[in-house]
Image (spheres, helix red, strand yellow):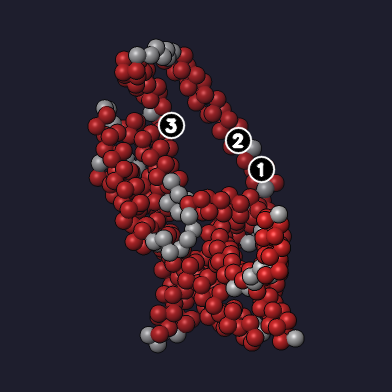
Amino acid sequence: MNLNTKKSSSITPWIVGGLVLILTICLFIGLKSILMPFAAAGVLAYILNPIVEKLTKHKIPRTTAAMLVMLLGLSVIIILLLIVIPMLINLVDSIYEKLPDVINWIHLKLLPWLNQTFHINIRWDADYMMRMVTQWIKSEDVNIKDAASKVLPVVWQQGSGFVEWVTNLMLFPFLLYYFLLDWSRWTVGISDMIPRRILPTYQRIMTNMDTILGAFLRGELLVMIIMGLVYGIGLALVGLQSGFAIGMIAGLLVFIPYLGAFTGLLLATLAALLQFHGWTGLFMVWGVFAIGQFLESFFVTPKIVGDRIGLSPFWVIFSLMAFGQLLGFVGMLLALPLAAICLVLVREGTQAYKNSHYYRQQPDNAIIRNEEQDNTA
């Protein structure tokens, strides 16, 4: 009787935890249309909450600490947007204006070099391409004018979506503040609701989740900032126009393995082809990304995040695609936190399975003897 009771009590937390996880996922899927500001504010509040805790330890009221940290986080985001967005607009305008020059460069320099180097014969009708580009630009101008004449009805029809977007934007600072303000109260309240007999299991699992999730999110955030500055300053030093914006974009996408460097390299290469006349500038741009990728792979990420987290690039990419498919943009925001939570649950479940009587039970001696007799016969 005692053995059965012990088995039942050891299985109960996993049944309850599994049901809670399934219900939470179903709730997220059902409410995904309104979860975007809550998910973004919750993730950012989790990252910033340790700063609030440190301020409260220095006798600063939690209301004041939450307000200061909220203003700090929003200020950093706004400053980055004010720096990066105008540079990107200039880059797009530059690409739009210099597109004919790119066609001439391909016709007069790139194709002759390819034909001579690789002994091939690629033909390129530059005049035809120029006419096509000119027609495309003119057609786009017409389309823009047509769209401008119809913009008022479209805005009127899509007013609800626009209002929802503005509402989410205005709601975000308030949500972030109240997340920071009530974070400790919520965690204590949830702990008080847990049955006392499974409280040690709950505390162990939540501690492991907090360790892995906190180290990963805060470490990745720091890596993103460092690599954004490395790429941005490096491209600015080689003289690339809008190089700092391109570098910051590459850094902010570092949390998706290889996507940040690939996207930044593609944008920087295109910008270098438009700006520099020769291979020297292009090679310098490629050198910046080669150095940045080397620093990220062997120094920055191993030192800050390390291998203790256990989220391999494969699982990062899979979680982003899977949760993005299930929950849309909200899933992209919650993908890495949910992946870290699933990792902890899998580890705990595996350990519980290996410690179970079912796993550790040895085969019966009678069965072994029968198998040996059969083999002998």
Amino acid type assigned to the residue bearing label 1 in the image: Val
Say which residue appears at 66% left-offset and 78% top-offset: 10
For residue 286, above or below residue 48: above
Observer-nearest of 8 and 105:
8
Q: Nearer the viewer, residue 155 or 24?
A: 24
Residue 201 placement: quadrant: bottom right
> Relative to 41, does residue 285 appear above or below in the rendering?
above
Question: What percent of the width, then of the height, locates residue 197?
Answer: 65, 86
- Estimate the spatial distance between the alpha carbons at disc 1 and disc 2, rounded to whole Å: 9 Å
Distance, label 3 to label 2, CA atoms, is 19 Å
- The answer to the question of whether label 1 and label 2 lie on touching residues, with beta carbons closer than 8 A, is no
Cα distance between the residues tagged 1 and 3: 26 Å
- Return the residue at label 2: 147
In this picture, is 173 found above or below 62? above
Disc 3 element: helix
Q: Is residue 182 above or below residue 332?
A: below
Q: Amino acid at mark 2?
A: Ala
Task: Give x and y (percent) for residue 87.
Answer: 38, 45
**Left or right: 108 as drawn, with respect to 280:** right
Under circle 1, the secondary element is: helix
User: Along the polypeptide, which appears first: circle 3 or circle 2?
Assistant: 3
Q: Are marks 3 and 2 in contact (CB under 8 Å)?
A: no
Residue 296 percent across, percent down from the top left:
34, 52
**Amino acid type of the residue tagged 3 in the rendering:** Tyr
Mark on residue 154?
1
The answer to whether residue 78 is visible is yes
Identify the mark nearer the N-term, 1 or 3. 3
Query: Residue visible at 51% across and 54% down?
Result: 316
Mark 2 residue element? helix
